[in-house]
Image: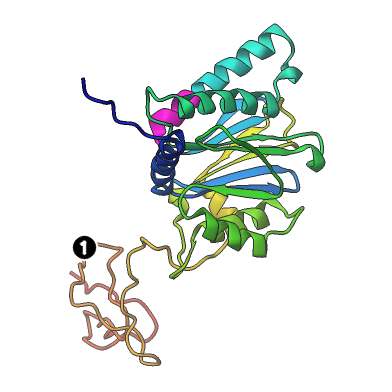
């Protein structure tokens, strides 16, 4: 009988942790930022159908990075748990701490069991309170650890670089526009330089305590995001601007002009139209058709 291959528990846990960390680092970063009226959640997500940020309950939001199918299962389980607890007791009994503890137990059990691979996910559970002091941001790791974050928090991708940028530029009690501008700039900040993320690639949601509805979660559409961000530089994926010619000489004339296309017009110095009846350039008046 052959001797079974032995792996120490320490080495087994280390290998499982490295596996989960590598899977999470392959995605885009997600930032949670507290502002004057609530909690802002923003990430780079080109998909319009697969959301990383969603609503859990009246005052609770869910955000995750990693494998979509894994954190989507966790989101659905959290929604069901919140609905059952709110129905059996009271809607005020559904809290972010309760949901975070439930997620921590699930993730910890999956990570420590040897029968399946660990989940490659990290989760934010955000809760908005009556005042800014009551706002909560809970961060849950792949191994079931829970951390209570204050001010801002980042997970996924190059989280260290994004977190460093936020620590230098974050201002407590900022407005929504200011907080969004700093968060988007942090997500676009890399070691090689800064890039401008297109508005269409941003997924932005807020927990806004000033909303009159019981449900405080709101997803911001691209038009609203563009309004809050204001003018920015050229997006990373935008098409290059046409050549405007040498400085001080005006624009160059395009050789591929299409007269039938009203949007394709020649720029620069163009010869004036002639009066068809006299053959002379017009004197400020539009040309007149010759008599029949």
| Place of residue 102 in the rendered image (x, y in percent of width and height, measured from the top left) | 60, 22
Residue 72 on the magenta span: yes
Residue drawn at x 21%, y 79% as measured from the top left: 276
Quarter of the image for residue 125 reads top right
Would residue 181 be visible to someone looking at this image?
no
Region rendered in magenta: 66-74
Q: Residue at x 59, y 56 (%)?
A: 163
- Considering every residue shown, the one lying at the far top of the view is 88
Q: Secondary structure at mark 1?
A: loop
* Residue, disc 1: 260
Q: Is residue 205 above or below residue 239?
A: above
The C terminus: image quadrant: bottom left
| Magenta stretch, overall SS | helix
Q: Position of residue 126 (x, y in %)?
A: 65, 36
Residue 226 within the segment the image draws in magenta? no
153 up-or-down from 97: above or below? below
């Amino acid at each position: 009988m052959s001797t079974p291959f032995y792996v120490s528990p320490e080495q087994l846990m280390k290998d499982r942790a490295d596996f989960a960390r590598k899977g999470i680092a392959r995605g885009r970063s997600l930032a949670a930022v507290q502002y004057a009226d609530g909690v802002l959640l923003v990430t780079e997500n080109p998909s319009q159908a697969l959301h990383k940020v969603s609503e859990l309950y009246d005052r609770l939001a869910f955000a995750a990075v990693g494998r979509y199918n894994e954190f989507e299962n966790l989101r659905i389980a959290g929604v069901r748990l919140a609905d059952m607890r709110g129905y059996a007791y009271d809607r005020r009994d559904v809290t972010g701490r309760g949901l975070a503890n439930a997620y921590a137990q699930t993730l910890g059990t999956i990570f420590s069991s040897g029968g399946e691979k660990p989940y490659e996910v990290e989760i934010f559970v955000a809760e908005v309170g009556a005042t800014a002091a009551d706002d909560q941001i809970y961060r849950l790791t792949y191994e079931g650890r829970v951390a209570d974050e204050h001010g801002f928090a980042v997970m996924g991708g190059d989280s260290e670089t994004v977190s460093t940028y936020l620590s230098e530029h974050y201002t407590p009690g900022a407005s929504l526009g200011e907080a969004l501008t700093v968060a988007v700039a942090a997500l676009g900040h890399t070691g090689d330089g800064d890039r401008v993320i297109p508005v269409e690639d941003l997924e932005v949601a807020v927990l806004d305590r000033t909303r009159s509805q019981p449900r405080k979660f709101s997803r911001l559409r691209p038009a609203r995001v563009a309004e809050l961000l204001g003018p920015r530089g050229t997006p990373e994926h935008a098409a290059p601007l046409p050549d405007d010619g040498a400085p001080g000489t005006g624009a160059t004339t395009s050789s591929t002009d299409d007269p039938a296309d009203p949007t394709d017009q020649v720029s620069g110095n163009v010869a004036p139209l002639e009066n068809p009846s006299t053959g002379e350039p017009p004197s400020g008046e539009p040309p007149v058709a010759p008599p029949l």
